[in-house]
Amino acid sequence: MSRNINIVGNFNIRAADAKLAVFDFDGVFTDNTVYINEKGEETVRCFRGDGFGLTSLKNAGVKIWVISTEKNPVVIKRCKKLSVPCKTGLNNKSAALKNLARKLNVPLANVAYVGNDINDIDCLKMVGLPVVVADSDNLVKKSALFQTKKSGGFGAVREVCDWIVACKNYQKKK
C-alpha cells in the first residue's frame, strides 16, 4: 500500500464512499502502446502489481469492472486473469457505465471511474469520483477530481486501488 496517502479533503471522502470502481483498459492498465507481431497480433504492456491492488480493493468490498471501446482479446484475457469482469467493443461507454451502475444497484455518486483519453470524458463527468492517470490527455485532466502520480501501465491502477482502500480504512477508524 502507498505510504504517502494524505487522508484529508473531499476527494478522500468520495474515495471512502466508492462502491464500484470502473477502469478503462488501454492507457490505464497499459502504457497506451501496442506491439504488433509479424502475424498482425497485438500485445500490450501491463503492470503486474496492479493485480495486488485490485485484490485489495475487492477485499475492501468494492466491485470492479473494466469497460473499453476496443474489441481486443488482450483486454478479455488480462481481465480474466485478474478475475475482473469486462465489457469490450463499446460504442457508448457512458451508456454502458450508467447501465452497469444501475444493474449493480450502485448510485453514480458512489462510482469511481478511471480513464485517460477523450472517450472517457463523459464517464468522468457522471461519477462521484472521476480519476485520470498521470499521462492523460490535458483536456481529459480537466474532467477529473484526482490525478494519479503514476502513468498508465506503470502502477496507476495500483495507486488508485491503494488510495481507495486507505480512505476506506481511515473512514472506519473515525
Image: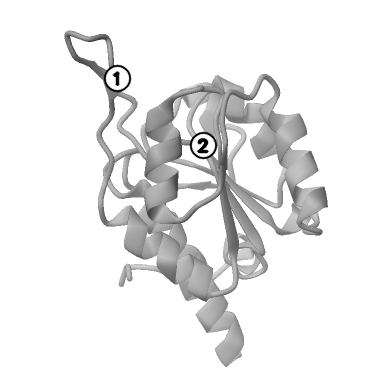
Q: Residues within 10 Å of mark 1 (few under 14, many from 20)?
A: some
Comparing 15 with 84, the one in front is 84
The image quadrant that residue 98 belongs to is top right
Is residue 57 shown left or right of residue 148?
A: right
User: Does residue 112 appear anywhere in the picture?
Assistant: yes
The colour scheme is: one colour
Q: Position of residue 80 (x, y in %)?
A: 43, 48
Q: Mark 2 points at which residue?
A: 24
Q: Position of residue 168 (x, y in %)?
A: 56, 76
Mark 2 or mark 1, which is nearer the start of the sequence?
2
Disc 1 residue type (three-letter): Glu
The image quadrant that residue 86 belongs to is top right
What SS does tag 2 mark?
loop
Q: Mark 1 points at which residue?
A: 42
Mark 1 or mark 2, which is nearer to you?
Answer: 1
Residue drawn at point x = 30 percent, y = 39 percent: 153
Q: Which mark is on residue 33?
A: none
Q: Position of residue 170 (x, y in %)?
A: 53, 82
Disc 2 residue type (three-letter): Asp
Q: Position of residue 2 (x, y in %)?
A: 32, 67
Comparing 10 with 53, the one in front is 53
The image quadrant that residue 33 belongs to is top left
What SS does tag 1 mark?
strand
Is residue 47 shown left or right of residue 118?
A: left
Residue drawn at point x = 31 percent, y = 46 percent: 150
User: Does residue 162 appear anywhere in the picture?
Assistant: no
Image quadrant where one finds the N terminus: bottom left
Classify 70 as above or below 60.
above
Q: State how far apart marks 1 and 2 are (Cα).
A: 18 Å
Residue drawn at point x = 37 percent, y = 42 percent: 78
